[in-house]
């Protein structure tokens, strides 16, 4: 039934084509074959439920087809699988009804990846569309064609993109730019060719294309900064007229660009702080590159954009690039965004929090805009609190504390807890208010809510450490609280406090120990540890009263269930109780336990987050996200600015598109009577160009023309800079005369820069190592390599994705490549790769299979079959591939690590390889060795990584702590000891060789 | 950029999914559900959630979570702003953006999403272009479509995408040419216990409804433009003209749009239109609390204060409230402890009040917390900052349009602490 309908449809659709008959026939035969296969397949297992839909699709009434397509799309939207309808749907691709056609496209793009062969049937329709005289049809054909994720059509796509990139219509060129990342993700091998297309499109002068091509640039070759030079000024000038989404992408890219090309505008100030007199002599006066100024000037108006993402992009650009005195302008715009949706607030506040640490003055005038309302969601409240705390200084602290006082009465207890911590931070940072804060917190100790009391105890503990002798009454007060407070953290804090300052409360301390000894067995682990500490400290200072109690506590601890507590008890007993065997250490026990401890520093979690580019996902998560491009440090000396000089060509094409918005001001100012019809309005600008070209003919020095032109436009707004700019201009003219000499210098420099940039980015994809599965000699011309792609294997999350690359080196085609006779250890599972029907001679094809290794390094053995031969092959995973990265915060990491001690911890002392002594290379090597993600860490001596095993999701925690002279300690915590030991070996190898 | 989008309703069902690249299994939403469980309130779900292979960025609107799946670095605001734009578009198309409306129009929704993103990068987000491509469903059109079998998809090609003024269609025609502008200001304020203002700001917008034939070029000027401290514009406004002359010059989009939003700085004194006298006390040991509220007009420049609504979240210990309003009606929800009092218009001769007692849990100690009082209100025909439009001129077309300007003041986030 289905067959007849298909044939009919095929005839009707093809009768329009004026293509060669032969080609049609070949296609037809091919199609018949596939249809036969498919329909026989579907008769077996497809249920009856879609039969009515098929019937409707086969009918020749458009309304029925439309109805059917609507129902199918509704099913797709709900996530139902409708792939069995593929053959019935795809033949409607050439349907006359425009809505049916569109819905078929939707369907096709969704399922083409799964039904690659059938999807090919539709390709010819799109190829025809690419030649259509109407630009919109050409564009939409390219759009759908490039969205079909079928590897076989990569060459067709490449051709289509190249052709579209030189299309007359800017809209088609825009679509070509959009298609570039699609093709790249389908086949990264095309990179070099795609870069050529990108280079070509970057030179395009229309606003329509600019955003899309920079997007493609960022996805395909963000390291090729050299491609931007020639287009830099053009991009800056077009920016205001580019559509808003493109603006975001361009601004972010230009931020990175500027960081590599210009000098730090704040360099003199920063030097002042570090080195005083000697640096003064050497210091050169800073002159801003006019291109740097151009960027700042042209982005500033975008702070007024209605799009929050654009405002944020400009804000981060100013934060990273502008001279200190000018950064202030962004504050107002960011504060405005706080009126927006709560999600926008959340992101903006995170960024404001980071900025407010570095440049507090900027937000101080807006202090009140960060005041908290009871209706704010808790996460917003906490972030605002963070900002308020960062903004606190001697002058405004009293208002801030008054504000905090009202917050403490809030009904939202999480928020109250955060407020108490904020008070603690203000108190440590600003000495004048320490006593006031402490008194306020002590009052909170009588609060009814236990959480509030507990939080106060913890904060008071930290504050008291700064000057304990003055506050023995507070310690006494807190000692009384042990009867009531149940929150373990708070109990532990009180006990620590009493132990530490037992000399200030000599009468109460032993009594507290007595009570604690009584309840020891029922306490939480952290409390138990602190009881042992208290006992030890009391024993050392007041052994007369507490000797027996201490013995008792230590005995209880000796038989505790937690080995950590047992260890601690054993250790302390040896240390403090003198026996004949005890070593030299016990003499110093008192010094060890009661050493003066430095007061804790309460720091903002947002400190030093600005090493991530602000506004980025990585900044928000405080962890490097995939594909994040590191913001480079300023160069020591500015690279040659002449690389950005451009020969002025005819830019007539650009004229029409920019005229209506800001450049339109020119004619708007001249009076509206000139504006009749859309053609007339482009006059002034066009005339200007004419004038320019005339000048060009007469003058030989053409470049300076455009230069001056852009400068003069802006001179009213930036009068203060004009002097320095004039200077630079003079210099530039000199430079231009010696242009030829310089260009050779620039060329030398560029690859070097490129190299630098490459080194700075660690992308996991570059770390992929491939293994040989079948050598081409044993494989009789067929060679197979595999690598662990580290991508999620979508059909089954417990499987490791293995990407295989088949290369046919023989002279004849290989057919029906598939796998058979899989031999596995128990528990292991394999998802086979789809059969590769044909691998022509000299071609290469990749396939992905999934293997569940059950967290073991046992090999998966199977036979690889072609139409003639069978090969025994096996895949053995290195242990590092049996895990997937997870994201942990520093605290989570520590907590998890605390639970994986003892047997689950493996430590190894290593000497790092000479080339691998900086943090960067350690991270790179560890990540290459194992599929882990980095955990943020406060200290720069430690690198931490976390992952989970793929099958059982057991945590794998890796710590590399470096010491002097390349010595380091490698620690691995993992529940699965086998994995742990094997991983130690692998990482050891990676770090020492 | 954006890989996939999932729409999740309040009860945790994924009722729509759309993929722009290869399909991402919906099991990725489990991470979202986990985060949702951890957050106590729906609005406390973090907007960005990292998972092992993806990042989830979500917005919550109209009790629907719009969850976008991202695979690599992208500015989070980019995605958030886009998702909000999607919601705005749905609202524009269907009038409301509810689960039912989306389910009823699932095909239109799908077509819209298909046009708005290409390979995860925004393509057409301008409502004018979208409306040219896909016509919004109306009752009349649905009826006609079912009878004649014609479609919602625009027959002509989307020339707007090629236009140099992408926000405006060509060939617009009206018999009555009208341009209306609404100046709406909102007061954000925090008033402390004693009635003094802690912070007060004015946020304003100018919403426009322009139905003019052809390609009109409008200029709008203010009597006192210096009042505007910080502004953000619709892309149609020529920025340099504003910089130089403080005049809004633009070719308007067709239909409704937001021309401008602005901020009047907190340096200027902000007039607070109402005052509130309150006495909310709980006595130690008794299971009763006193509740006493009186509202009155303050600086209203002779205009009436209307649609007043007072709401307050009472402490958890309050079991019930027995109150007596002098006007309007009040409700108290014993589950959420939300008290709301619909006052209506304030009559300066007879001030509205709400008095009575609250019953507390017997034996429980008195609550520490003081409830805050939120106020909503409206004042017609006045912009509280004093902003005034001077004149509106049209160039480029020959006819004479009908022009209208309306002012209104509302309370934004207006809170009184007690």
Image: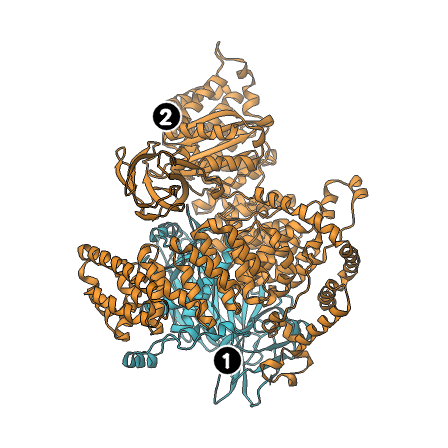
Chain colours: A orange, B cyan
Q: Please, is residue A928 above or below residue A354 in the view?
A: above
Foreground: A849 or A411? Answer: A849
Crowding at dot 2, Cα within 10 Å, few <14 / some 14-19 / many 20+, comes out as some
Q: CA distance from mark 2 to mark 1?
A: 82 Å
Q: Chain of mark 2?
A: A
Of tags 2 and 1, the one toward the viewer is: 1
Q: Quadrant of the N terminus of chain A?
A: bottom left
Residue B403, image x, y percentages = 55, 86
Asked where in the image residue A974 lies, by quadrant, the reply is top left
| Total count of labels | 2
Residue B308, image x, y percentages = 46, 73
Residue A909, image x, y percentages = 50, 24
Foreground: A724 or B102? Answer: A724
Foreground: B44 or B242? Answer: B242
Residue B68, image x, y percentages = 42, 57
Look at the image and tell me whether residue A626 can be seen.
yes
Look at the image and tell me whether residue A374 can be seen.
no
Task: Provide the secondary structure element on which disc 1 rests.
Answer: loop
Q: Chain of mark 1?
A: B
Residue A561 is marked as none
Residue at the image point whose x is 42% and y is 22% from the top: A554
User: Which residue bears the numbered disc 2?
Assistant: A560
User: Which residue bears the numbered disc 1?
Assistant: B170
Residue pushed farthest right? A281
Do callouts 2 and 1 mark residues in contact (Cβ within 8 Å)? no
């Amino acid at each position: 039934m289905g067959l007849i309908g298909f044939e009919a449809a095929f005839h009707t659709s093809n009768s329009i084509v004026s293509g060669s008959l032969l080609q049609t026939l070949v296609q037809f035969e091919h199609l018949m074959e596939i249809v036969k296969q498919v329909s026989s397949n579907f008769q077996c297992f497809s249920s009856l439920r879609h039969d009515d839909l098929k019937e409707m699709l086969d009918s020749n009434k458009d309304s029925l087809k439309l109805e059917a397509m609507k129902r199918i799309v509704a099913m797709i939207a709900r996530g139902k699988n409708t792939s069995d309808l593929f053959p019935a749907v795809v033949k409607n691709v050439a349907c006359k009804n425009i809505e049916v056609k569109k819905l078929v496209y939707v369907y096709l793009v969704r399922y083409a990846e799964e039904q690659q062969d059938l999807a090919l049937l539709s390709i010819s329709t799109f190829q025809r569309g690419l030649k259509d005289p109407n630009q919109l049809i050409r564009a939409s054909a390219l759009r759908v064609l490039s969205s079909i994720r079928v590897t076989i059509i990569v060459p067709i796509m490449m051709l289509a993109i190249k052709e579209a990139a030189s299309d007359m219509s800017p809209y088609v060129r825009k679509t070509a730019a959009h298609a570039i990342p699609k093709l790249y993700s389908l086949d990264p091998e095309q990179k070099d060719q795609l870069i050529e297309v990108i280079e070509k499109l970057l030179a395009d002068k229309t606003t329509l294309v600019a955003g899309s091509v920079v997007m493609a640039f960022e996805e395909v070759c963000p390291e090729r900064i050299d491609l931007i030079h020639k287009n830099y000024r053009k991009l800056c000038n077009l920016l205001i007229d580019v559509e808003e989404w493109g603006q975001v992408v361009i601004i972010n890219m230009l931020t990175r660009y500027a960081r590599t090309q210009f000098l730090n505008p704040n360099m003199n100030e920063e030097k002042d702080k570090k080195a005083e007199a000697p640096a003064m002599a050497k210091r050169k006066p800073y002159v801003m590159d006019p291109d740097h100024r151009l960027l700042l000037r042209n982005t500033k108006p975008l702070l007024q954009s209605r799009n929050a993402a654009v405002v944020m992009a400009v804000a981060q650009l100013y934060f990273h690039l502008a001279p200190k005195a000018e950064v202030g302008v962004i504050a107002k715009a960011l504060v405005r965004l706080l009126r927006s949706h709560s999600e926008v607030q959340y992101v903006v506040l995170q960024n404001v929090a980071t900025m407010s640490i570095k440049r507090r003055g900027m937000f101080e005038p807006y202090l009140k805009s960060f005041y908290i309302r009871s209706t704010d969601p808790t996460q917003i409240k906490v972030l605002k609190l963070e900002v308020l705390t960062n903004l606190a200084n001697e002058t405004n602290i009293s208002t801030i504390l008054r504000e905090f006082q009202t917050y403490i009465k809030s009904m939202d207890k999480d928020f109250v807890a955060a407020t108490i911590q904020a008070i603690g931070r203000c108190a440590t940072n600003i000495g004048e208010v320490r006593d006031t804060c402490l008194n306020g917190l002590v009052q909170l100790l009588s609060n009814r809510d236990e959480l509030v009391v507990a939080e106060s105890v913890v904060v008071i503990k930290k504050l008291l450490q700064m000057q304990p002798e003055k506050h023995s009454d507070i310690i006494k007060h807190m000692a009384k609280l042990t009867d009531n407070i149940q929150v373990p953290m708070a109990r532990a804090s009180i006990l620590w406090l009493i132990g530490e300052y037992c000399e200030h409360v000599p009468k109460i301390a032993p009594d507290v120990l007595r009570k604690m000894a009584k309840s020891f067995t029922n306490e939480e682990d952290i409390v138990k540890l602190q009881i042992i500490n208290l006992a030890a400290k009391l024993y050392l200072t007041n052994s007369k009263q507490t000797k027996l109690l201490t013995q008792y506590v230590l005995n209880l601890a000796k038989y505790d269930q937690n080995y950590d507590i047992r260890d601690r008890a054993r250790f302390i007993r040896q240390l403090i109780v003198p026996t004949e065997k005890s070593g030299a250490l016990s003499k110093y026990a008192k010094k060890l336990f009661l050493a003066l401890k430095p007061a804790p520093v309460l720091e903002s979690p947002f400190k030093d987050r600005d090493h991530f580019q602000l506004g980025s996902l990585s900044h928000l998560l405080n962890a490097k996200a995939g594909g994040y491009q590191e913001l480079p440090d300023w160069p020591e000396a500015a690279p040659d600015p002449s690389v950005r000089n451009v020969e002025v060509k005819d830019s007539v094409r650009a004229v029409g598109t920019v005229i209506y918005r800001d450049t339109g001001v020119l004619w708007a100012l001249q009076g509206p009577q000139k504006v009749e019809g859309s053609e007339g309005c482009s006059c002034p600008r066009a005339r200007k160009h004419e004038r320019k070209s005339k000048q060009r003919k007469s003058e030989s020095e053409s470049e300076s023309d455009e230069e001056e032109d852009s400068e003069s436009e802006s001179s009213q707004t930036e009068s203060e800079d004009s002097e320095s700019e004039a200077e630079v201009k003079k210099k530039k003219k000199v430079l231009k005369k010696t242009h030829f000499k310089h260009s050779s210098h620039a060329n030398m420099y560029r690859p070097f820069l490129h190299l630098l940039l490459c080194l700075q980015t660690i992308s996991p994809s570059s770390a992929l190592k491939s293994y040989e599965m079948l050598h081409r000699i044993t494989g009789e011309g067929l060679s197979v390599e595999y690598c662990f792609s580290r991508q999620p294997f979508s059909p089954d999350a417990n499987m490791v994705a293995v990407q295989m690359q088949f290369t046919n080196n023989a002279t004849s085609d290989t057919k029906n490549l598939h796998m058979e006779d899989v031999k596995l250890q128990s528990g292991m599972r394999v998802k086979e790769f789809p059969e590769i029907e044909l691998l022509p001679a000299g071609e290469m094809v990749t396939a992905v299979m999934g293997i569940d290794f059950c967290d073991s390094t046992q090999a998966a053995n199977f036979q690889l079959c072609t139409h003639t031969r069978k090969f025994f092959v096996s895949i053995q995973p290195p242990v590092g591939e049996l895990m997937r990265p997870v994201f942990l915060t520093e605290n989570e990491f520590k907590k998890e690590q605390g639970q994986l001690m003892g047997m689950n911890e493996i430590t190894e002392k290593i000497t790092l390889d000479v080339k691998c002594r900086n943090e960067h290379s350690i991270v790179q090597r560890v990540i290459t060795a194992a599929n882990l993600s980095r955990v943020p860490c406060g200290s720069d001596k430690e690198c931490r990584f976390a992952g989970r095993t793929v099958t059982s999701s057991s945590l794998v925690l890796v710590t590399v702590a470096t010491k002097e002279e390349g010595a380091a300690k490698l620690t691995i915590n993992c529940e699965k000891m086998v994995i742990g030991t094997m991983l130690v070996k692998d990482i050891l190898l990676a770090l020492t060789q | 950029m954006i890989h996939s989008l999932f729409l999740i309703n309040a009860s945790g069902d994924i009722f729509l999914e759309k993929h722009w690249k290869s399909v991402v299994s919906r099991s990725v939403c489990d991470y979202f559900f986990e985060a949702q469980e951890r957050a106590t309130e729906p609005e406390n779900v973090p907007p960005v959630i990292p998972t092992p292979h993806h990042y989830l960025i979500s917005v919550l609107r109209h009790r629907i979570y719009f969850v976008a799946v991202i695979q690599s670095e992208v500015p989070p605001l980019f995605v958030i702003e886009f998702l909000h734009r999607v919601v705005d578009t749905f609202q524009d198309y269907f009038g409301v953006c509810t689960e039912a409306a989306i389910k009823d129009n699932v095909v239109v929704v799908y077509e819209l999403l298909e046009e708005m993103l290409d390979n995860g990068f925004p393509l057409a987000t301008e409502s004018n272009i979208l409306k040219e491509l896909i016509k919004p469903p109306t009752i009349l059109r649905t009826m006609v479509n079912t009878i004649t079998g014609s479609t919602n998809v625009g027959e002509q090609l989307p020339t707007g995408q090629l236009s140099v003024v992408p926000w405006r269609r060509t060939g617009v025609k009206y018999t009555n040419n009208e341009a209306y502008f609404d100046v709406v200001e909102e007061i954000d304020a925090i008033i402390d216990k004693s009635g003094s203002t802690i912070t007060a700001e004015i946020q304003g917008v100018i919403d426009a409804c322009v139905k003019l034939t052809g390609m009109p070029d409008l200029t709008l000027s203010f009597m006192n433009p210096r009042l505007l401290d910080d502004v953000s514009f619709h892309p149609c406004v020529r920025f340099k003209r504003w910089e130089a002359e403080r005049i809004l010059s633009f070719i308007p989009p067709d239909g409704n749009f937001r021309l401008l939003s602005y901020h009047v700085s907190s340096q200027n004194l902000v007039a607070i239109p109402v005052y509130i006298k309150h006495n909310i006390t709980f006595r130690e040991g008794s299971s009763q609390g006193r509740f006493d509220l009186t509202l009155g007009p303050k600086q209203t420049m002779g205009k009436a204060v209307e649609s007043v609504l007072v709401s307050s979240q009472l402490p958890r210990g309050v079991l019930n409230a027995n109150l007596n309003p002098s006007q309007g009606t009040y409700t108290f929800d014993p589950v959420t402890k939300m008290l709301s009092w619909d006052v209506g218009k304030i009559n300066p001769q007879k001030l509205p009040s709400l008095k009575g007692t609250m019953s507390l849990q017997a034996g429980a100690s008195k609550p520490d917390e003081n409830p805050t009082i939120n106020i909503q209100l409206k004042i017609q025909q006045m912009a509280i900052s004093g902003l005034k439009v001077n004149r509106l001129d049209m160039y480029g077309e020959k006819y004479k349009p009908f022009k209208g300007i309306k002012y209104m003041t509302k309370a934004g986030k207006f809170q009184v602490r007690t």
